Every structure is written in C-alpha cells, then in structure tokens.
Image (cartoon, rainbow, N blue to C red):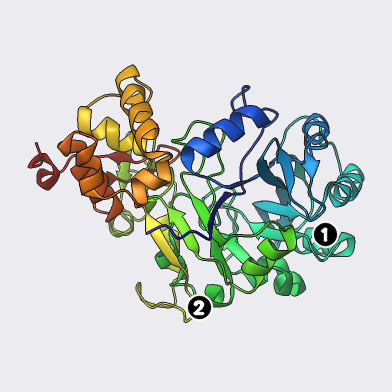
Amino acid sequence: MIEKDWLFADLHIHSCYSRACSKDLSFPSLVKWAKIKGLNLLGTGDFSHPKWIEEIKKLKSNGKGFYFYEDFPFIVTGEISLIYTQNERGRRVHLVLFIPSIEVAEKINSYLDTKGRRDYDGRPIFKISCEEFTFEMMKISKAIEVIPAHIWTPYFGVFGSKSGFDSLEEAFGKEIENIHAIETGISSDPSMNWKIKELDSKAIVSFSDAHSFWPFRLGREATIFHSCDSYFELVEQIRKNKFVGTIETDPAYGKYHFDGHIDCDFSCSPNETKKLNGICPKCGKPLVIGVDYRVDELSEKNKGEKPENARIYFTILPLHEIISLCYGVKMESKKAWDIYNILIKEFGNEFNILLNVSKEEFLEKEVDSKLVDLILKNREGKIKVAPGYDGEYGIVKMDEEQKKLF
C-alpha cells in the first residue's frame, strides 16, 4: 500500500518550550522516534521562541529550505495564538506557519517583537486579527504558508464553537486568497470537512500537534507528500493540492468530537444536545459544543459528497492503542512497550506495520493472531472509539464483534 515515493510528514509539533509539553523534547529525541514511527520529515515547531530558534540554527541547511539533524530533515514551523475582538466578539485562533528559511523566521520574529513578548511560551499570544497577521506575513515573504490549525476545536479553532467564525472569509477577509489549506485536527477528518463548500478550494492537511515525542502522539496524524527535498516543492504540493493524502485518527478519538462537560462526566451526540437545548442535565450550564455538532451547524453538503480534488486518507489509530486494546493493558505499560519494540524490530517502523505488512508476513514472524486481526481491522478503520469531549480523549473500545476475535 505504501508507495516508494511517499514522504510522511508531521509539520505541526512543539518543543520543550511550549506549555504542557514534554521537557525532554529535543531534536535527538524527535528524530529517534520519527524514524520509529515511519516519518520522513518533521516541522521544527516553536520557531518564535528565542531559545528554540537557537537550536534550529544548529541544523544543517541543504540550501532549499530543508534543515537536517544528522540525516533527518526538518522545515521551519511554529504555531501562533491570536486573541482579539472582531464584530464585538472575542476571537481565539491558532495558526500554523511554514517558513522557507531561518532568515525569514528571524524577520517574522522581529515583527512579532513589535507586537509583544515571545519568550514565555513556544506558542505565543498576540492581539492581531487573522487578516492583519496574514497580510504582514505576506509582506515578509509570499513563501510563508499560513494554515488555520485544528480548525474545529471549540477554544482555538477558526470554526470553533467558543470563539471561532462561521467562514474563513469572515476570519481572513481580503487575505483569504493567501490561505491555501486547513488542518483537520484530531476531532475531524476530510469527509467531515468536505461538507463545507468553502473548503472545496482548500487543501486539507493533517498533523499531530504533538506535545511529546512518543509514537502514540508524534505522527498520529500526518500528511503524505510526494518525495522531495525542497521547502518550495513541498509547499507547491499544498498550494496546488497535489500531495498524496493524509493519515487520520478516528475523529471520535479527538478531545472535542462530542459535546459535554468533563467535570460532570457527561457527553452526548449533537442530536441529544439539541434535545437538551444545549444545557447539561447534571449542572444546568451550557454544554461545551464539540466538533461534530459544529460541522453539522455549518454544513452545506451531505457527508460523502467529495470535491473533485479530494485527496485520499487513511483512518488508523496508533499501534500502542491497538496493543493496549488487545491485551487490556495501558499504552505506557511495560507489556505494551515490549510488544511494540518486538514489532518494530521485525517490521521496521510503525506506519509499515499499520498500513503495509500483510497478514501472512505477520504470521510468518509468529505475531499473536489476535493482535494481527486487530491491526488489520484498524487498517480498515473498523476499531470502535467512544467519542472524546470537553478535553478528554476518546476511548478505544472492544465491541461485541471485536470480542469474537478472542
């Protein structure tokens, strides 16, 4: 299934300088686990942080916008948080930036220094509108790619229920022509985004927004490009929507797929939310409206109506989740790691295991048939997930059909 010219990229990640991120995030650890995952390219993340940009400068340039730690390539990337007021409503939007060179990154940082501090977090906050920010980026370099991040999440997605907009045009105004792509986020997938007519002209990309280097976080979502060694070739694939496709988790796996209240231990589907008039039955306060509800709210098309330029996508859960499900152990347990390491030793990397290795090849290496069956079901997108909500990840379930495997 995996073609020779495919390049697996995770371009939305963070460093040890971002809040709520592993303090062990470093280029050596990222490269080690990216290779184990099967990734071929990473974003540096956090270019705006003064200390992390110094680490980025130590990478070796190939003169075409790729920067190497040893033999592994990166492009310069980062995430910016914009918090401002528009049309008498507070807005909070996260944007991912792809940047053609360290020199351009430094120009962006000089601009950001005129707007506020950037030394307190790898994802700094600025009181700038999406339109103004994109305009200023294009003044610095037309090669900068501005991508609305995890566009449906309630608190920081451009379409989020808490502080988002009802259209990209409302958010970006005249700069909409310089927005070529959107990021699905863990809680949505391309088929959900196909329901929004405005997105027909935009590429749909996916990345992990990883806060650690562990393989159940790094690369859990990724974009598959045609092999290249140039930032400009890579971005051209996005702008022309000519990349291969994306790796997606089941949207239910995301922290904000359903509506609910984590403090009340309550979640529900959009239909149930409507019956409840959006009010939590336990505390009487408004529910946090999730991604599934919000997509339906803005939908102009039926699910399954593909745009002509739609890319392929694969719905798979991380291998640790499948091992955890099979043996009833935690993902971080010694048993899960022991099994994971054996599989990696036998088959090279996680994406190869999840997408490529045949049933016969697994059984030849005496892999547990129960685990093999679950890996194959995962490959077909048939593993059930109880939807996440209000900041809680979805839970991979063993339904009745899956129990028969045992």
Q: Residue 264: in sight, yes or no?
A: no
- Reading the image, the residue beneath label 2 is 309
295 to 107, vertically: above or below: below
Give the residue type that dot 1 points to.
Answer: Met
Q: Residue at x 85, y 60 (%)?
A: 136
| Residue found at the far front of this picture | 364
Q: Position of residue 35 (x, y in %)?
A: 53, 38
Which of 215 and 345 lies nearest the eye of the viewer? 345
Q: Which mark is residue 12?
A: none
Q: Earlier in the sequence, mark 1 or mark 2?
A: 1
Quarter of the image for the N terminus: give it: bottom left
Answer whether residue 349 is visible to the viewer in this image.
Answer: yes
Residue at the bottom extreme of this rendering: 308
Left or right position of 273 against 208: left
Residue 351 location (% of width, % of height)? 42, 46
The image shows residue 90 at horizontal and vertical percentages of: 67, 52
For label 2, the SS is loop
Q: Residue at x 30, y 20 (%)?
A: 335
The numbered dot on residue 137 is 1
The type of residue carrying mark 2 is: Asn
Give the percent coordinates (x, y) of residue 145: 72, 60
Q: Is residue 388 left or right of residue 73?
A: left
